[in-house]
């Protein structure tokens, strides 16, 4: 539990730093809130993952395969929704703000590709990794 709380604090700190670096206008604040909501961990998804882990040892192999496939599909849909939210928010930024966003999010990943602020199930720690723009 302490690790989850630490991850949430780290996410809040990264998002706060990003928000400060972007110098958003009042008109951009609604987009910021939508972005943060979209990349925040989904408690129902986390509960679904815990339930899946609990059930796995009790299921026959074909059912386990089906359950894993359903989880992968749900995770992929979540990543696509998050990616769309990131792209929509990014498009609302001015070029200097986009540069700041790029710098802050790459810095949070050690300078390379990986999860956006907020993290992801695919990249852990917190529940929402996003693919890099193409």
Image: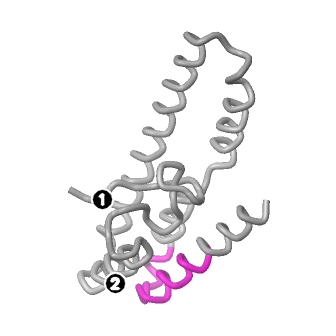
The x and y percentages for residue 56 are 67, 24
The foreground one among 120 and 32 is: 120
Q: Quadrant of residue 4?
A: bottom right
Which residue shows up at 57% across the image and 53% down it? 127
Q: Residue at x 49, y 39 (%)?
A: 75
Residue found 43% across the figure and 47% down from its top: 79
The C terminus appears in which quarter of the rendering? bottom left
Report which residue position mark 1 lands on.
132
Residue in front for this viewpoint, 33 or 54: 54
Dot 1 crowding, Cα within 10 Å, few <14, some 14–19, many 20+: few
Which of marks 2 and 1 precedes in the sequence? 2
Q: Residue 36: horizontal and vertical position, in percent?
A: 53, 65
Is 48 placed above or below 32 here? Answer: above
Which SS class for mark 1?
Answer: loop
Magenta stretch: helix, strand or loop mostly: helix
Q: Which residues are magenta?
A: 12-29
Could you say which disc has been placed on residue 100 in the image?
2
Give the residue at the far left of this rendering: 134
Q: Nearer the viewer, mark 1 or mark 2?
A: 1
**Residue 18 belongs to magenta span:** yes
Q: Residue at x 31, y 76 (%)?
A: 102
Q: Nearer the viewer, residue 126 or 24?
A: 126
Q: Residues within 10 Å of mark 2 (few under 14, many from 20)?
A: some
């Amino acid at each position: 539990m302490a690790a989850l709380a630490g991850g949430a604090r780290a996410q809040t700190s990264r998002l706060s730093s990003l928000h400060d670096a972007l110098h958003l206008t009042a008109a951009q604040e609604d987009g910021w809130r939508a972005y943060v909501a979209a990349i925040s961990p989904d408690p129902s998804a986390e509960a679904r993952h815990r339930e899946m882990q609990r059930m796995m040892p009790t299921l026959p192999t074909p059912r386990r395969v089906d359950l894993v496939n359903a989880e992968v599909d749900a995770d992929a849909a979540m990543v696509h929704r998050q990616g769309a939210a990131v792209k929509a928010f990014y498009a609302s930024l001015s070029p200097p703000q986009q540069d700041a966003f790029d710098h802050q999010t790459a810095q949070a990943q050690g300078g390379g590709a990986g999860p956006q602020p907020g993290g992801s199930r695919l990249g852990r720690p917190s529940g929402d990794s996003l693919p890099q723009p193409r």
